[in-house]
Amino acid sequence: MAGDGEIVIKDVKKVFGPTVAVEDVNLTIPDGCYCCLLGPSGCGKTTLLRMIAGHETLSEGDISIGGSSVIGLPTGSRGTSMMFQSYALFPHLTVLDNAAFSLKMKGVSKSERREQAYEVLKSVQLEPLADRMPEQLSGGQQQRVALGRAIAPEPSILLLDEPLSNLDKQLRMEMQVELKRLQQEVGVTTVFVT
C-alpha cells in the first residue's frame, strides 16, 4: 500500500506547442524519501515539479500521489507544497505572516495559524526575526522563510525548485545540510530540483 507521500510518475510527457519539455518519464519516489532531480537548464526538471504540484497539466501519462491519480485535481487538493526558486515572499507581510500565509489560505483561524507559524519559524531558526519584513533579511534568511511557508501546512510532499541557486557557495553548502535535517525531522517526501 502506498504511503501518503509516495509519488508515481508513469509515462509522463509535456508538450508546449512544437517543443517537447518532458518525455517518457517513469519514476517512483517512496513515501518519506529525499529525491534530487539533477540536470542542465531547460531539461524539464521544473516542468516535472510543476506537473506534480498541479501548476502544469500533463500532455500524456499519469501522476499518482499516495496511491491515487491526481490528474484533474486542483493544486490545493494534492497534499503538496512548493517552494519556488524566486522564494515568492510577500514584501508587505512580516516573516511571521509570510510563514502563516498558506495556513490562512486553508482557513485556519488567526490565533492557530500564528501559533503554527511560530513553531515553523523555530524549526527554520527564524523565530527571533518574526516581525521583520523580507527586505530586512539576508538571502539565506529569505530562503528559510520560504521553506517555512512551504512546510507550515504539513504537506505530504515538499517540492523544492532550485532553492539554493540564489545563495553563495558557503551558504549553499550549509543550507543543503539544513534542508536534509529538516526533511528527516518532518518526515515529508521531498523532491529537490537542481
Image: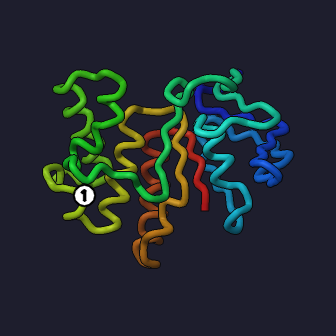
Crowding around mark 1 (Cα neighbors within 10 Å: few <14, some 14 to 19, many 20+) is: many
Instruction: Name the one closer to the observer, 93 or 158.
Output: 93
Disc 1 residue type? Pro
Residue in the image at 26% along x and 33% along y: 116
Residue in the image at 59% along x and 32% along y: 5
Residue in the image at 61% along x and 44% along y: 50
Q: Which residue is mark 1?
A: 134
Q: Secondary structure at mark 1?
A: helix
Point out residue 12 in the picture as x, y percentages from the top left corner.
80, 40
Instruction: Name the one closer to the observer, 90 or 97.
Output: 90
**Lateral position of residue 45 relative to residue 137, left or right:** right
**Lateral position of residue 50 relative to residue 165, left or right:** right
Residue in the image at 42% along x and 59% along y: 178
**Lateral position of residue 20 relative to residue 165, left or right:** right
Point out residue 143 in the picture as x, y percentages from the top left corner.
37, 59
Looking at the image, residue 184 lies above or below residue 104: below
Point out residue 17 in the picture as x, y percentages from the top left corner.
78, 48
Instruction: Name the one closer to the observer, 67 or 60.
Output: 60
- Quadrant of the rendered structure where residue 109 is? top left
The outermost residue toward the bottom is 169
The outermost residue toward the front is 17
Q: Quadrant of the C terminus?
A: bottom right
How many marks overall? 1
Q: Quadrant of the N terminus?
A: top right
